[in-house]
Amino acid sequence: MSKQFATFELAGHLFGVDVDRVQEVIRNQTTTRVPLAPSAIGGLINLRGQVVTAVDLRERLGLPDAGPDHLPMNVVVRTADGPVSLLVDVIGEVIEADDELFESPPETLSGPGRELVLGVHKLRDRLVLVLDVDRAIDVSAVV
């Protein structure tokens, strides 16, 4: 059996989320910063009249800042509380991955990534880190 994943890149790493969780993928949107919000909140975006929280996945995963000239893309995912945007570097494609090639997160994965990655899928030439969307958007524990 296999699953489909919408993929994206962050700091050169390939990530994937279950395609069923993805509402849409959009180019960079103007974000409005939220005073006193956790640093993992990249801001708020206006998605056709709906205010959507944007989570900075680089910050959430403990990856280095991309710099002031970087314009992140948005992967809008469905959650129990409505849509949430994941700010990513580059949007990839939808891939199909065989369940037999899924493995637990490698022991070398540490820090925030360890708790936010469900596991990895081995592709022919790369690994796809499968992101736990619900944990990634839960910034309540992040200061």
Image: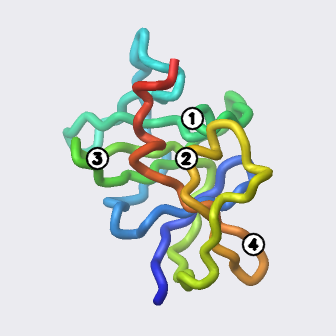
Crowd band around label 3 with a 10 angstrom C-alpha radius: few (<14), some (14–19), many (20+): many
Q: Marks 1 and 4, how far apart in space?
A: 23 Å
Percent position (x, y) of residue 137?
42, 40
Residue carrying label 2: 116
Q: Disc 2 marks which amino acid?
A: Leu
Residue carrying label 1: 60
- N-terminal label among 1 and 4: 1
Q: Marks 3 and 4, how far apart in space?
A: 29 Å
Crowd band around label 1 with a 10 angstrom C-alpha radius: few (<14), some (14–19), many (20+): many
Question: Given this view, does label 1 or label 2 mark the residue nearer the observer?
Answer: 2
User: Mark 3 and 1 residues: CB-CB less than 8 Å, in contact?
Assistant: no
Question: Given this view, does label 3 or label 2 mark the residue nearer the observer?
Answer: 2
Left or right: 66 in relation to 52: right
Quick one: SS at disc 2? helix
* 24 or 115, nearer to the observer: 115
Q: Marks 4 and 2, how far apart in space?
A: 19 Å
Question: Given this view, does label 3 or label 1 mark the residue nearer the observer?
Answer: 1
Q: Quadrant of residue 25?
A: bottom left
Quick one: SS at disc 1? helix
Percent position (x, y) of residue 54?
42, 36
Left or right: 137 in relation to 104: left
Q: Disc 4 marks which amino acid?
A: Arg
Q: Disc 1 marks which amino acid?
A: Arg
Q: Marks 3 and 1, how far apart in space?
A: 18 Å
Crowd band around label 2 with a 10 angstrom C-alpha radius: few (<14), some (14–19), many (20+): many
Residue carrying label 4: 126
Residue carrying label 3: 83
* 135 or 104, nearer to the observer: 104
- N-terminal label among 1 and 2: 1
* 40 or 141, nearer to the observer: 141
